[in-house]
Image (cartoon, grey):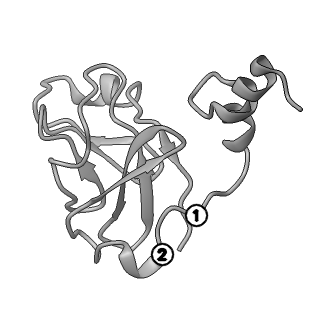
């Protein structure tokens, strides 16, 4: 029989928990390929291991899965998917399937800062 502490350690899967960190090292299915939207279609909300994620397909049909941005907690869900990335409604920044910022329409000095900003993205396969 597990102790209460061991049971808690085994059952908690959030970020920065022992089991959560272990499970994040493996592939976990969250959607069937047919459930993903068409390229540049509306993104799909997913909850996995206690995290709210957004799954989408870019213009080329590559699938992506991202967390909300750490700075503003803005989700990529409401901004939609368009031209090779998923945008944030809050400020219009667009991120590709790897989490790299590819457009900052609200920033005057886009290039230097854009290369420093990343969304947490998970590798997605279909």
Q: Would you call the spot at circle 1 few (<14 residues within 10 Å), some (14-19), or many (20 or more)?
A: few
Q: Nearer the viewer, residue 108 or 81?
A: 81
Q: Could you say whether the residue bearing mark 1 is in a helix, strand or loop? A: loop
Q: Could you say whether the residue bearing mark 2 is in a helix, strand or loop? A: loop
Mark number, residue 29: 1
Residue placed farthest to the bottom in the image?
A: 34
Task: State if disc 1 and disc 2 touch (CB < 8 Å).
Answer: yes
- Report the number of discs: 2
Q: Residue at x 75, y 37 (%)?
A: 22
Position of 10 relative to 124 (above/below): above
Could you say which quadrant of the image residue 23 lies in?
top right
Position of 23 relative to 125 (above/below): above
Residue placed farthest to the front in the image?
A: 1
Q: Residue at x 46, y 36 (%)?
A: 120
Describe residue 37's horizontal placement relative to residue 16 as left or right: left
CA separation in Å, label 2 and label 1? 8 Å
Q: Residue at x 48, y 75 (%)?
A: 32
Residue topped by disc 2:
32
Q: Where's residue 15, x and y in %?
A: 57, 27
Q: Would you call the spot at circle 2 few (<14 residues within 10 Å), some (14-19), or many (20 or more)?
A: few
Describe residue 100's horizontal placement relative to residue 85 as left or right: right
Q: Residue at x 48, y 38 (%)?
A: 50
On-image quarter of the N terminus = top right
Q: Nearer the viewer, residue 22 or 68?
A: 22
Q: Where's residue 93, x and y in %?
A: 21, 38
Could you say which quadrant of the image residue 63 lies in?
bottom left
The reply to whether residue 18 is in sight is no
Describe residue 48's horizontal placement relative to residue 67 as left or right: right
Q: Where's residue 48, x and y in %?
A: 49, 48
């Amino acid at each position: 029989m597990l102790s209460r502490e061991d049971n808690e350690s085994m059952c908690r899967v959030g970020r920065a928990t022992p089991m959560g960190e272990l499970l994040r090292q493996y592939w976990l299915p969250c959607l069937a390929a047919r459930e993903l939207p068409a390229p540049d279609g509306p993104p799909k909300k997913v909850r996995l291991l206690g995290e709210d994620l957004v799954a989408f397909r870019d213009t080329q049909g590559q699938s992506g899965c991202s967390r909300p941005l750490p700075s503003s907690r803005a989700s990529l869900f409401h901004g939609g998917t368009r031209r090779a990335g998923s945008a944030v409604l809050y400020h219009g920044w667009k991120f590709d399937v790897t989490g790299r910022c590819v457009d900052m329409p609200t920033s005057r000095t886009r290039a230097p800062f854009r290369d420093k900003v990343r969304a947490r993205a998970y590798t997605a396969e279909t």
